[in-house]
Amino acid sequence: MWLVDGDRPGFGEDAANEENHEDSRVPRPSDDGGRERESSVPRTNGDSDDPTDVSTATSEGDDSDRPDDAEDESSAAPSGSGPDDEAVSERVLDDVRALAGEGGQFDADGEGHGRPPAAFPADAEDAASPGAVEDRITADLVAAFESGTAVAPELERPDESFLEASFFDFEPLAGRRELAGYWLNEPYAYAAILVNPVNKRRTYHVFEPTLDDFERYLRQDLATKLRQELRQGTASQSEQDFERRLAALLAEHGRTVDDGTLYKLLYYFQRDFEGYGVIDPLMRDRGIEDISCDGHDVPTYVYHREFENLRTNLVFPESRLDSFVDRLANMAGTHVSIASPLRDATLPDGSRLQLTLGGDVGVRGSNFSIRKFSEVPLTPVDLIASNTYSVTAMAFIWLAIEHQKSFVFGGPTASGKTTAMNAVSLFIPPDSKIVSIEDTRELALPHENWIAGKTRASASIDENQQVTMYELLEAALHQRPEYLIIGEIRMQPRVIRTFFQAIGTGHAGFTTFHANSATNVLRRFEQEPLSVPRQMLEELDLVGIHRMLQLEDRRYRRLHDLAEMSGAGTDGSARLQTLFEWDPSSDTLEFALSEYMESRIAQEVIDIHGWTAEHLFRDLQQRTEILWYMVENDVTDFEDVATIIQTAYRDREYLLESIRSASFDPAQLRGEQADVSLEPGTTLGGSEAADDV
């Protein structure tokens, strides 16, 4: 089992320094108006988690994991030391730079790094054998060092025999087969989806460099020294000096330590001081949506896009979990305590974080959940290609959004509400004024005329420091938005009523809401404690319900139904009319009306333009053609999709002619549409920008 433990082999050489955890915090600029707060900088907070190797023992048949027996890693080990040689230091510094990208993180820009393959074996019989997996990983490892992609050209490469025998521990592969495997941080972290051929259970296993007793001792010793040096400077100095300080420390051992050991240590220092520590490999996996640590001494789980819920080989013992939860809070710029044990926050990469500290409110002790932020959000094309939406439904939604219709995206947790809202927001006209409000940053839009707001929780017991969603919403109404997007409306009466007041005064509004049906959305709005008046509810235009559905042997996200408001019913309540409805027998989203003219929204569009029914049908056909072209030609790049949609607004005839030609290139279209380019120091008119206002 992948352990985070100071008393057993694996993560834990920082355990001896836990009493210094608070001292490791250094001031850094905050997000709240330039003030500083006591927090932990990801680059310098290596003392709160878990330096480790991966040690796994597997019993046949039951697919269980247990730690190997080993000596206490805190026992003394001989320390190799050498002169502080400038040449050795520069060699090590080059190594640090080679391992780190320009942004200070390990590069993961190779083909497929952190990205699962497009296709997976259907069952264990088609999966790779342990020997084949070991051979492939080892071959990639050796090739990475031989080609120079893992190190700087001037570095001395590790011996091939060292890489083959001492870099990874492949014992966890025994008795299992690999359904899928890919590098997360080549050649240091590898993810394997393993299956037990006997009981068919699938697990997620991370392979990282294994450390022997001396390497663990050396790592613990150097980590302590590195933390002490980093604490002596300011946060900015620590950021700038990290690589050189690390290189100098490693140079002390450069003459007596194998090059292979040096690379292992560099990886773990980079992971723990600059990355997310023990969960850094999981954070790099683009196939993972959620990470869930449910408590101490139980396996951490992930939700994989292809394999759904998987048990990992990561287990936090009680002695280390509280410290790691505190570290995550520090990285998110917040804190947790026994007095305030629950916290929602955002990690530096935008991922949503929920923390629980201690056993008072968590039966299994501290726990955390991470909803990973997608750096490249899904587009309408992705939703069509995955059969979540139909192309005809998406074309109708495009028409509605262009005409400033409001939309509530409903559904249970993890049903794809926010993903869908972000995707269809690409249909907002390119120059429209957008204001968004979120508790946790999740939206990503290509629009320039966009004010993105985020609530701020109080960093202390003084609630005056917090900025609430209601306050941001009140401010947004003074910013003259044409489109108002609220990340998620919870049971907050003032927020919901203000939202409906906004859409009732001409603003298009999008939001997500937890409900299992369109009717339930309206019912919850009308009932206590929200009590939205019926007249306000009638200002809403569309309600889409998203669900996670079990189809055959796996689950899929689907738009279950799309309904529009159609006035009041005979009992005076708001009435819905279903436009599209999911058919379980064919797994398709079907149009529920006999013709588009029966739709209130379609009729309003006709009235605005003075169209006939034929005009409306032709308009929807053109939108469908544009969307279907992107699906058929696999145009899923976020920038390409956004460019095509924006071009459809500016010159639809030109776009249609272009996509009907064999030479259409979205990248070229981006260049043609770049009609304004601002150089530093100039305004739109080309005059000198004022230095002082």
Image (tube, rainbow, N blue to C red):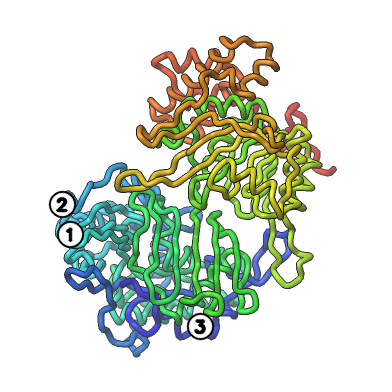
Observer-nearest residue: 256 or 582?
582
Secondary structure under tag 2 reads: helix
Secondary structure under tag 1 reads: loop
Residue at 61% of width from left, 77% of height from top? 337
The crowding category of the residue bearing disc 1, from other C-alpha atoms within 10 Å (few below 14, some 14 to 19, many at least 20), is: some
Horizontally, is 534 left or right of 612 in the view?
Answer: right
Dot 2 corresponds to which residue? Answer: 125
Three-letter amino acid code at the position of disc 3? Glu
Query: Looking at the picture, how far across and down is residue 4, in whole percent?
Result: 39, 75
Query: Looking at the picture, how far across and down is residue 158, in whole percent?
Result: 26, 65
Alpha carbon distance from label 3 to label 1: 42 Å
Alpha carbon distance from label 2 to label 3: 46 Å
Query: Looking at the picture, how far across and down is residue 480, in whole percent?
Result: 78, 37
Query: Looking at the picture, how far across and down is residue 300, in whole percent?
Result: 39, 67
Instruction: Assign the C terminus to one quadrant of the image.
Output: top right
Dot 3 corresponds to which residue? Answer: 18
Dot 1 corresponds to which residue? Answer: 197
